[in-house]
Every structure is written in structure tokens, then in C-alpha cells.
Amino acid sequence: MKAVRPPLFLTLAAAIVAVAIALPLVYLVIRTAGIGGEELWQLLSRPRNLMIFVNSAVMAAIVTFFSALIAVPLAFLTVRTDLPGRRLWLLLTTLPLAVPSYVGSFTLIATLAPRGSFLQILLEPLGVKELPSIYGWPGVILAITLFTYPYMLLSVRSGLQGLDPSLEEAARGMGYNGRETFFRVILPQLNPSAIAGGLLVALYALRDFGTPSLMRFDAFTRAIFVQYKASFNRNSAAALSLMLVALVLLILWLEYRVRSRAAYYSRGSASGRSPKIVKLGIWKWPAFAFCVLICGLGVALPVGITLFWLIRGLNSGYSFPNLLPAVLNSVLAAGLAAAATIIFALPIAILSVRFPSLITAIIERCSYIGFGVPGIVVALSLVFFGANYLPLLYQTLPMLIFAYLVLFLPQSVGTVRSSLLQVNPQIEESARSLGRSAWQTLTEVTLPLVRPGVLSGAVLVFITAIKELPATMLLAPIGFNTLAVQIWQATENVDFADAAAASLAMLLVSVGSTLLVLSQEKLNNKT
């Protein structure tokens, strides 16, 4: 049988994207090589850098563990039980995805910080002059866990919805009670989706910059930024970046292995059959309280504290700033990033699904490099590249959009790829047999069929890009102020009212985008 070759325009487009995405990583290697072997070894073996390595790895592991403790019960409660208000909790428990972790960190600091916080003001009449410090380990673990667990929740919920009900029915027939069925039948089948979601949480924890900075925690992203800003020692910053990249690539490898194993799980007869709803009985109200606690910390607290500091500032004579330029800049940059990632994600997704081979697999894996590399690392690489070789593009909007493309392309590739897997290739083959060219088949047949995945990918990239901080700080054009940068600068200056105003604007934009994603998911489930 003659092998089917992919159209040339798809191969060229995907190859260009793969090379462009790998470029920052290659440049980091070249930059680090300029240090010299002895100096590099001294840098890598420095006790403080080793401590930062351990801090980052342990922090990612702890955040993942606590995220699992939150996400797995929430997924089961909102999908498979008679929890009161189940559909409402389904929405509310996903909303922390719309809250940037540094906005959440700001609200935690504004609520629990040792001096001048909301709780300290409440307790001051009782003689409490200073609360215990939230900075460091407690703050960074609490903040990142609260605002990243939805990544695991979405993954586990998807896995739960795909389970075959006949397995549970068989377990019941063998005499298992509800608890035994959950721990011996349901939970083992959720392992692939839980581990895959947990790895996403771990990657997010490693690449997060805003929370470690605000919580004064020595993680890689903060150390790299300080090294770059304080000493202008770009070689050392590049070497630190490569240490982080090595840790991230290890996690990506684990993710790849887990995902490969997960591919053997089949939804089989689950499609079209609704599983039996579990009756919670006396556990209904403890489960209800658990949902209230998590949503209170992850949704009500950011919104409530933001409004509190904003109203408090207004009562003290604070004048509401003109946020319209920052909002427009944020929406413009995030919108262009969403459009660019979709345009370049399509050829990669089509090649990996319709024309699987070693080359297409390499191209697809290259696109994931950016996902595992923190924004501060990508930004640093592009600063080097732009300042030395492309000064005309340095600190311009195209350079910023390119950074977003490198960072967020895999989110679009993943959603488009998933939609494409659900399209029968015989439909496209029929179009070709009726005389349609490859381009006509793509635009007239394939694209309309994968439209839900395209839209979901675009909105996900929009939500992520509008929250992005380090790349925006280093690569945005001079005077191009976004909401993310404005929040960070206000928080650094301990200007809670100014930070609250910008945070509220970002929450409104992000929540609207998240609701669009959820409505798209609901539409997909119906079709």
C-alpha cells in the first residue's frame, strides 16, 4: 500500500513553527556555552542554586499533591453524586482557572499578611498587633494550589465521564459496596487522567513567576529574573534557565510516558450510557461544606478582597484610574496571540493525526517545548535574540506575540488534535475523491468539523495570555502597559487599591472567557 504524503504547505508550515519554537532553547544553550566549563560548574554547584533547585522541585511536588486532594473529590462530587447544587458547583469549582495566580496571591497577602491586611485589621481591636507571616513556603503552596487545581479537576472530570458504567455494575454484582467500588474500581481507572492533570499542575508551578515573587519564595523563575535585572549577568541567567529547563524536560518526559499509557484506556461502551448517580446520604452536607470552602478561597476571596480594597481606597480619596488603555492592550495582545496560535496549531495537529510518522511526531514534540519552558526563560531568550540580531523587532508587539506563540501553542494543538481525532478521515477522503484539492478539503471540510476545538483552543490561549507576566514585562513595547504588568507593579509598591482596580478588570475579562470555554464544553457534550 502506497504511503500517503502530507501536502507540502502543511509540512512547511509545521516545520517552520517547530524550528521557531526550538530557537529560544537553542539560543540558551549557545549562551550558556560561552561561560566556560569551570565557571559553569561553580555556578551550578553553588549552594544557593542547588537550594533553589530543590525548592522548586519540592514546591511542585507538594502543590501537585494538594491539588489532587482537592481535584479528585471535587470531580467525583460534581459529576457522579446527588450533591445539592451540583451544576452550580461544576461551574464555580472551575472558575479559579480564570484567576491569575498572582492576583490570587495578592488577595491572600491582602487578607493574611502580617501587617495592614484585612484579617489583621479585624483582629487589631482584640490586641493582635501582627499576624504570623504568610510569605515563603505557606504562601506559595496555598496560592498556587488554590489557583491551579482546576487543571487537574478538568482532566479527572473528563476521565470520570468516560468510564464504562459496566465495570461498576460488575463490581456491585460481586458484592462490593460503594466505598469499595470507588477505591478498587473507579479510582484506579482515573489514575492516567489524574497523573496527566497533576503533571500539568507541576509544570505550572515550576513556570509560575508572579506568585513566588509576591510570596518572596526562592524559586527558579524569581532567581532568574533577579539575576537578569539586578546584575545584568546574562550568561548566569541563561545557565540558571537551563537548570530549570532540565527539570521541566524531565517532567515533560514523564507526562509523555503517562500519556502514552493512557492511550490504551478506551471509553468503549460508556458512550451513550449514563452512570448511576451515587447517593451521598449523611455525607451530603460535609461534601457541601467542602465545596463551599474551596470555592470560598478560590473564587469568593479574590473577588471579595478585591472589592474590599477598592471600596476602601475610594472611601479614602483614591480616584479610580483610567484602565481602558491597559484593558485594550491586554485584549489586543491576547487576541492576536489566540489567532496566531490557532493558525500555526492547525498544520501541526493535522500532520500528527492524519499523517503519523517519525518526522511528524518530532514536529509535534517540538511544539511542546515552549509549554514546558517558563515565560521568564522564553522572554530572556528573545531579549538576547532581539537585542543582538533583530533590533528592529526588539520590544515590539510582533516580538511579544511570538513569545506568546512559543509559550501557548500546545494548548491549541491539544484541543484541535482532540477534535480532529473525532472526525472520520473517510469524510476528507470522500472530498478528495470528488475532486477537491488538499487546500479545499482543509477549508471546506476539515475546518468546519473541528471548529469547536479551534474555538476552545483560542479561548484557552486568550485566558492564559492575558494573565502572562514575565514575557510581557520584558518584551512589550515601551509604554504598552497591560493589566498584568499594572497589577504586578501596584503590588510591588504595596498599592492595594490600584492593584485591586486592575485585578477586578482582569477578573471580569477572564471570567467571561472561562464561561465561554465551559459553554463550548457543554455544546460539545450535546453534539
Image (spheres, grey):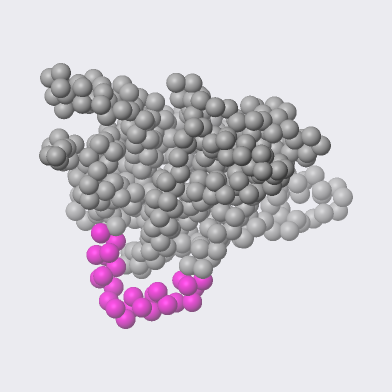
> In the rendered image, which quarter contains the N terminus?
top left
Q: Is residue 28 left or right of residue 81?
A: left
Q: Which residues are magenta?
A: 26-51
65 vs 17, nearest the viewer: 65
Identified at 21% across, 26% down, the residue is 429
Relative horizontal placement of residue 272, taking residue 120 as reference (left or right) = left
Judged from this view, the residue extending furthest toward the bottom is 38
Residue at 50%, 45% (x, y): give it.
193
> How far across and how far down the image is residue 399, in percent?
28, 43
Picture quarter with the C terminus: top left
Towards the viewer: 217 or 407: 407
Image spot of residue 525 (x, y percent): 49, 25
As displayed, is residue 243 above or below residue 387? below
Image coordinates for residue 97, horizontal then vertical, percent:
54, 38
Q: In the rendered structure, does residue 336 fall within the stretch colored magenta?
A: no
Q: Is residue 352 above or below residue 115?
A: above
What residue is shown at x 28% (from left), y 25% (from top)? 447
Q: Residue at x 51, y 51 (%)?
A: 195
